Image (cartoon, rainbow, N blue to C red):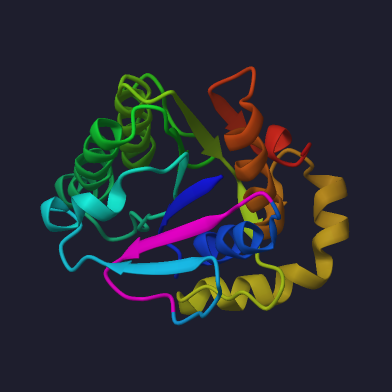
Amino acid sequence: MDVMLFGATGMVGQGVLRECLLAPDVRRVLAVGRNPTGQRHGKLTDLVAPDLFDLSAQETALAGYDACFFCLGVSAVGMSEAEYTRLTFDLTLAIAKVLARLNPTMTFIYVSGQSTDSTEQGRMMWARVKGRTENALMRLPFKAAYMFRPGAIVPLDGIKSRTGWYRAMYAVATPLLPVLRRLFPNSVTTTEQVGRAMLAVARDGYPRRILETGDITNF
């Protein structure tokens, strides 16, 4: 399986990349981003794209992949709806439309979030925008498109968030992971589980197009 990964330097993306490199059936991984991953591995190729809104110069390198794991994302804290829409909906769809055209047999997996609003009408701005993004992705002509809606994601294997207050929160939460998972089985997962679930869905599909935390942790 040949896979493509967006957001490989983020916390979730680091976990997904690790699982891809460990998976024996993954032949190659193309990490696409504004900056290289900084990792070296026989399966891994970095594709630096300074402007992710315009991938026309990179199109040749983006063809021929079986799956795309889209882990790019920004926090909505302090953002206007217009700004958050540009970086969440507009950017994601600009990339996904190119990939759907170049890879019609591709499975596209998008990291969304728990409480995303599929109606696009709710009071939470981020949830409306994420819901709009999910709905638009599922209309594109991919072989299949799946929306992952994890709740809290605890980083494992030395992975760290680039956001300071996330790192502080996870430093406290990680030792409590067994307790948190017992108390909140449908709200807490790990970077390892997200990566493994993405690979499993890319291989074999899933009965539902939207996967919540409970689905993700069952793999």
Relative to residue 48, is residue 24 depicted above or below?
Answer: above
Q: How many marks?
A: 0
Relative to residue 155, is residue 141 depicted above or below?
Answer: above
Q: Position of residue 74 (x, y in %)?
A: 35, 58
Q: Quadrant of residue 136?
A: top left
Q: Quadrant of residue 177?
A: bottom right
Instruction: Answer whether residue 91 is magenta in the image.
Output: no
Q: Residue at x 34, y 59 (%)?
A: 77
Q: Residue at x 73, y 38 (%)?
A: 186
Q: Answer with left or right where residue 206 lies relative to residue 107.
A: right
What range of the chain is rendered magenta?
25-37
Q: Answer with left or right where residue 168 lies relative to residue 33.
A: right
Q: Answer with left or right where residue 69 lies relative to residue 95.
A: right
Q: Position of residue 1 (x, y in %)?
A: 56, 44
Q: Is residue 10 visible?
A: no
Instruction: Answer whether residue 34 is magenta in the image.
Output: yes
Q: Nearer the viewer, residue 153 or 9?
A: 9
Q: Position of residue 27 (x, y in %)?
A: 57, 54
Q: Is residue 48 visible?
A: yes
Q: Quadrant of the C terminus?
A: top right
Q: Answer with left or right where residue 108 lies relative to residue 101.
A: right
Q: Position of residue 37 (x, y in %)?
A: 43, 75
Q: Residue at x 55, y 38 (%)?
A: 149
